[in-house]
Amino acid sequence: MRCARNLLSRVWMVALVALCSGCGYTQNLKMPNDIKSLAVPTFVNTIKAKQIYSYQAGLETRLTNAIRDRILFEGNVKLAEPSEADGILIGKLIAYVQEPIGYDKFERVDRYRLVVVTDITLKDLRTNEILWHEPNFTGEFIYNVSAGDSFNQSEAAQKAVEELAQDVVDRTVEDW
């Protein structure tokens, strides 16, 4: 009985120490040049009409909103209008590509890769310095169209946009 009580005390002590100490992982996010507010105007769609094969209307707005939402989620910088912001994230939608990458036994497409390509610049509005520029920043999503885990094109575009938004914010924030 005494041995069981001693063992139980040790287990509780170890659990208490583990709970109080935490895992030690912290997310030290910092904007470049100590930017505290960021403007994210709506991305411009520069895809030429003749190049749009399966483009999703309003994708530039969905992408802009996803980036804004991701910035708010991170919570390290506040969103502001360009006239009041320390920095600005300017983007252009330059390509939307859906390509078949898998076929069923009847040679019908059953899997696609959807890629959203942007040109993005982060600029410090106080100094007019370009902090970074990515001329071919992409988000992609691979999806099935005939399996149990199938997606439609609009859902796949949203997944690609969400991946791109996360990557843009990760690229913007430094000092992990």
Image (tube, rainbow, N blue to C red):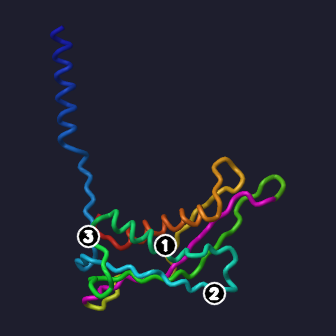
User: Callout 2, which amino acid?
Assistant: Lys
- The 10 Å Cα crowd at callout 3, few under 14, some 14 to 19, many 20 or more, is some
Residue for point 24% across, 80% down: 33
Residue 51 disc label: none
The N terminus: image quadrant: top left
Q: Which residues are magenta?
A: 108-126
Mark 2, secondary structure of its residue:
loop
Residue 30 disc label: 3
| Residue 53 counted in the magenta span | no
| Rendered view: 91 above or below 142 | below
Residue for point 48% across, 65% down: 162
Closer to us: 37 or 9: 37
| Rendered view: 125 above or below 95 | below
Q: Nearer the N terminus, badge 3 or badge 1?
A: 3
Position of 173 with respect to 62 (left or right) is left
Image coords of residue 90 (percent x, y): 42, 83
Residue 48 disc label: 2
Mark 1, secondary structure of its residue:
helix
Q: Please state the total of marks drawn on the protein image.
A: 3
Q: Nearer the N terminus, badge 1 or badge 2?
A: 2
- The 10 Å Cα crowd at callout 2, few under 14, some 14 to 19, many 20 or more, is few
Residue for point 55% across, 83% down: 45
| Rendered view: 19 above or below 33 | above
Position of 6 with respect to 170 (left or right) is left
Q: Kindly tell me whether residue 133 is visible in this rendering.
A: no
| Residue 116 counted in the magenta span | yes
Label pair 1/2, CB-CB below 8 angstroms: no
Image coords of residue 136 (percent x, y): 51, 79
Residue 63 disc label: 1
